[in-house]
Amino acid sequence: MDSCGFSSPRTECFPAGLRVLVVDDDPTWLKILEKMLKKCNYEGCDFGLRKKIERNIKMMIRQELIDCVCAVMSVDGETSRVMKGVQHGACDYLLKPIRMKELRNIWQHVFRKRIHEVRDFEGHESLDEMMLRGGADLLDDGFFFGGDPVPGKKRKDVDHMSDDRVGGDPSSLKKARVVWTVDLHQKFVKAVNLIGFEKVGPKKILDLMGVPWLTRENVASHLQKYRLYLSRLQKENELRTTLGGTMHSDLPPKDAAAGPGNASLQTLDTKSSKQNISVHHDDPRNCEGIAKASPTPMAETKAAEISDLAKSSTSSISFDRSFVESSDAKSEPTIQVQYSWSAGASPLQFKPEQKPQARAPPIGFKQEQKPPLRFKKEQQAPLFVAEHRFDHAPVAVHHRKDNKASDKPSPTATDPPYSKAKRGQSSKATKVESTAALFCIQPERPFTDCHTIDPIPSSIWSTKTSQSFEQNLYDEPWHINALLGTGSALASDYTSQYPPNPYLGTIDPFCFNGQELITDVSSLKFLIDPVIDEGLYIA
Amino acid sequence: MEIVGQLQKQFVDFSTSLNHEGFLDEQYLQLQKLQDESNPDFVCEVVSLFFDDSEKLLNNLATALQQQVVDFKQVDAHVHQFKGSSSSIGAQRVKNMCVAFRNFCEEKNLDGCLRCLQQLKHEYFLVKNKLETLFRLERQIVEAGGTVPVIG
C-alpha cells in the first residue's frame, strides 16, 4: 500500500488496516478468516458465539459504536440465498470457501459507502469498517464484519486518507456544511410549495431554488428534515387539539379555504408577518371574517402559508412569542388555524395549480396552544426544538395528505366546538401563525443552529437504520447472516428514498454499504432528542 | 538426506492422491499457503478445530435423528453447518455428502437421513485419517531436518 504521507495513529493507508469483524459460528472458519485477513493487512477480529455477538453488535450499532458495512458469507450459494442476503442489506455475498482475492477486495464496499456518505450527508463520518457475516445454520450463519468500537479515530483517519487518495476533488469529499439561512430556507419552502409538497423532490426543488452552489444532496437532506419537522408539528398539534378541549367541533366539510380565507391568506402572504399575526392574534372573529375559505387544495394553502411564513419568518418569531404569551386567544386561534389549514385555504391567491397537500400541520398551533409549556421547553433546548420540529413537520404534512380524503384533518374532526366561520378565517390566520411559529423558531435560532445539529439526525439515522436492519436481521430465520449496515450512507440515492419513518409508514429495504443502501427505519423516535420528545407530549 | 528425500516424496505423492481422490480440494492448498513462519502450525490448528467441531456436529446429528419426533429443520441446520466447516479445510467428499444429506432433510426422509449420517461419519473418519497421516509425514520430514514440500 502506498504511504499517504500524513501523520495519523494508523500508519497504513486504506484499505490496509481495514477493520473487519468476523462473526461466524464455525470456529474453523473463524481461524481461517483471521489468518486471511491478516494476510490482507486488515485488522481482523472474530467472534464465535453468534447469538451473543449479534446481540452485542446490535447494541453497539444502536449506540453508534459500530459503523460498518456488511457482507454475507455462506457455504450456500443458491441464488435465492444470495438475493435474500442482498435484500437484507448485504453489500456483498461471499461464497465459502472464501478466496484470498475476494477478501482482498472487500474494502471496496467500505470505500464506496464512505463516498456515498460524504456525498449524501455533507461530510458525515465515513465508515471504514467492514462486516462479513457468514455461517452455517438456519438462523444465522456466522458473520464477520468490520466494526470499530471507537470509530471516531478510525474514521478520521480514513477521512484523511480518502481525501488524500481522491485528491482531485476535495470539495466533494470534504464535509460541505450548508448553512440554511432564513433566506435560503424561504427559497426552499417556496420551491416546495410551488411543486406541491407531496410531489416534491430534491432535484425539482434545487432547480426551482436556483441556488447554484447548492447540491441536490443538500436539498434532499434539508427536505427530509423539513418533512420530519412538519410531521412533528402535526403531531404536536394533534396532541394539543385533543388535549385542548377548547376546540370547536364544527368543521366545515370543506376547508375554510374560501375566498375570504384566501384573501386572508393572500393578505398574509403579501403583508408582513407581523400583520398577519396581528390579524390572527387580535381576535378569532377576525379570522372569521376571513374565514370564508372555500375548499381549496391544501397544498395551495399550505404553500401559501409556508411561503408566507417564510417571508415573515422574522416577524413570526415575535408573533409566536406574543401568541404564546397571550393566554386568551391562544387556544382559539389554534383551533381555527387547524381548521383553516385542513380546509385548504385560498388556492386562488396562491398557486391554483398546486396540488392538494396534506394540511399544514397545525402543529405549530399546538405549540402555541400550550405556549407556556411548549415554549419553555423550547427555550430550554432551543436547538433541539428547532431541529426537532423541523424534522417532524413534513411527516405531519404527509399524514394530512393521507387524511385528505375528507379534506378534514383528523385533529380538526375531533374539535367539536368550532365555528365554521371562525374556522375559515381563524384557521387561515392560525395557519399562518402556526407556520409562522414554525418558522419563527428558525430565525430565533438561526438555521445554523439547526444545522449544527445536522450530524445528529444523520448519525441517529444510521443508528436507526442499523437498528431496524438489525431487527429484520434477527427476525429472519435465514441461513445467511444478514448484514449490519450502519452509517448514514445508507441511502446511496437520497432522493429516491426518504428514509422511512414511523410517520410515513414506509419501510424501505435496508441495504448497507454504499452500494445500495436501502434504509429501513422502523422508528424515527430515536432521532428525537429526549427533551423535545418529552416536550411534545406534555399536556 | 535420503530419508528426508523419501519422506518428502511420500508426502507429495500422498497429497496428490488425496487431491485426486477428492478427499481434499483446492481449499486445503489455500490453507497451506496461508501458513507461514509467523504461524507454522496454522494448518494443523485449523484442522484440529475442524475435527473438534465435526465431532460435535456428528453427535448433534445423531441425537437429532434419534428424537421421537425428528426436527428436520434442526437436522438440516447441523448438516448445513457441517457443510460449511468441511468446506473450510477442503474436505470435499464430506461436503458432498452433506449436500446429499440436506436433500433428504428437505424430503423429511428419516431413513435417507440416517443412511446419510452413517455415510457422513464414514467419510469424515476417512478424511480425518488421511489428514492425520499427512501431518505425521510432515512431522517426520521436519524431524529429519527437511522442509515440507509445498504442493501446488
Image (cartoon, coloured by chain):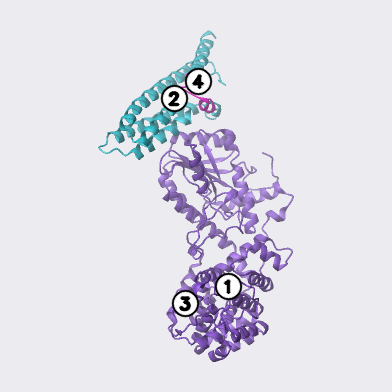
Q: CA distance from mark 4 to mark 1?
A: 72 Å
Query: Label 2, on which residue?
Result: B93
Is residue B23 magenta-colored? yes
Q: For the residue marked with disc 4, what is the amino acid?
A: Asn
Q: Residues within 10 Å of mark 4 (few under 14, many from 20)?
A: some
User: Would residue A46 be seen by someone viewing this image from the given angle?
Assistant: no
Q: In this structure image, what is the colour of chain B?
A: cyan
Q: Residues within 10 Å of mark 3 (few under 14, many from 20)?
A: many
Of badges 2 and 3, nearer the viewer stands 3
Determine whether the residue tagged by mark 3 lies in a helix, strand or loop. helix
Q: Measured from the top left, where is residue A509 in percent x and y?
A: 52, 53
Of badges 4 and 1, nearer the viewer stands 1
Q: Which chain is purple?
A: A
Is residue A256 magenta-colored? no
Instruction: Decide which of A410, A131 is in the foreground and name it.
Output: A410
Q: For the residue marked with disc 3, what is the amino acid?
A: Pro
Secondary structure, magenta segment, majority class: helix
Query: What's the mark number on residue A411?
Result: 3
Q: For the residue marked with disc 2, what is the amino acid?
A: Arg
The chain carrying label 1 is A
Which corner quadrant holds the N terminus of chain A?
top right
- Identified at 47% across, 52% down, the residue is A470
Q: Look at the picture and state if B64 lies above or below A229.
A: above
Q: Look at the picture and state if A172 lies above or below A255.
A: above
